Each structure stands twice: as C-alpha cells, then as structure tokens.
Amino acid sequence: MSNSRTARVVLIVSMTIASGLAGARPSRAADEKGPPTPQKDKQAGQDTGKAATHQAKAPTKSEKSDKAVAAEVTLKGDLTCARCGLHEGTACQNVLRVKEAAGGEAKYYLAKNAVAEENHGRVCGGSAPATVTGKLSSEGGKKIITPSAVTFD
C-alpha cells in the first residue's frame, strides 16, 4: 500500500473512533452486532425473559374485584326492568331483586345477552317472580349476572 492510501485509512479509522466517542450514532454494522435486545431476540426467535416484562401487567386489586367471575349460580327473586320498574337509568335492563337473609334486598342486573333480551318483554313495566341461572360478576359497584337461563315461577 502506498503511504497516502495508508494515511487515508488511518485518518478514516481515527475519525470513526472519535465520532463514536463523541456520542455520534455508531455505524449500521455496529447496530446489528451490538448487545442483544428483546427486539433482536424476538427476531431471532429467542426469549430471554426481558421481552415478557412488556407483555401483560397484573390486574390491580380494584380490577380484580370489578371483574371477579364466580361459578354458575341460581337466584330466585322478582325480575323487573331497571328503567320502567325501578326508574333507574335511561335504558331498559332486566334486574333481579333478591331478598337477603338479613332482611335487605340485593339487586342483580342481568347482562345484555339473548337470554335476557327474550325475557324482557314480560317484565318491562312490571315485575314477575323468576329464577335466574348464570355467572356472577361486578362492574362499577353493581352486581351483574350473565344469564344462561330464566324461568318464571
């Protein structure tokens, strides 16, 4: 190699090293060969565990209580309409009023599904004794039952 060509190579290498130390972005080749990252590991089909920390967070205590779902239960009470019978809200929704052992009353709002919709006409504007089978949950402090069967007594 000639002296001028060697000098150019040394100068280019020196400038590259200096720019890397000064905070300039490393070359593309350095990016590809750099330390492993979750994104590079995903591309390579590997899992280091770091990528899992970005996937799902654990629900908070209030989220757990709002979305707690129990096994299927059967409740007996008076089925009525929240809007027409109880004058709550602006939309019709079935509500099962159940007498508790302590003498109080609990309201279970029926989640809107085909079972709830097909039985609404009988209780809209009035009430009827009924048995509702379904899964319990709560949402915003309201007790919700997702009905799988409604029978009128």
Image: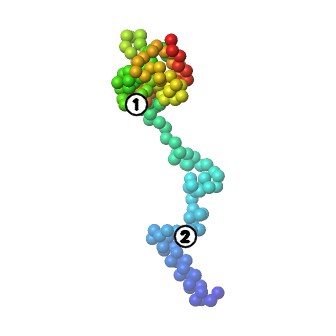
**Percent coordinates x, y for residue 46 in the rendering:** 63, 51
Q: Is residue 137 visible?
A: no
Q: Residues within 10 Å of mark 1 (few under 14, many from 20)?
A: few
* Image quarter of residue 106: top left
Residue closest to the eye, 87 or 64: 87
Label 2, secondary structure: give it.
loop
**Percent coordinates x, y for residue 30 in the rendering:** 57, 66
Q: Is residue 27 visible?
A: yes
Q: Amino acid at mark 2?
A: Ser
Q: Residue at x 36, y 29 (%)?
A: 89
Label 1, secondary structure: give it.
loop
Q: In the rendered image, which residue does mark 1 sit on?
A: 91
Q: Residue at x 56, y 84 (%)?
A: 8
* Image quarter of residue 138: top left
Q: Residue at x 57, y 62 (%)?
A: 34
Q: Residue at x 45, y 71 (%)?
A: 22
**Percent coordinates x, y for residue 44 in the rendering:** 64, 55
Sequence-wise, the earlier of marks 1 and 2 is 2
Left or right placement of residue 146 versus residue 46 in this view: left
Alpha carbon distance from label 1 to label 2: 62 Å
Q: In the rendered image, which residue does mark 2 sit on?
A: 27
Instruction: State which mark lies toward you, 1 or 2.
Output: 1
Q: Amino acid at mark 1?
A: Ala
Q: Is residue 129 above or below residue 112?
A: above
Residue closest to the eye, 148 or 153: 153
Q: Residues within 10 Å of mark 2 (few under 14, many from 20)?
A: few
Q: Is residue 24 above or below residue 144?
A: below
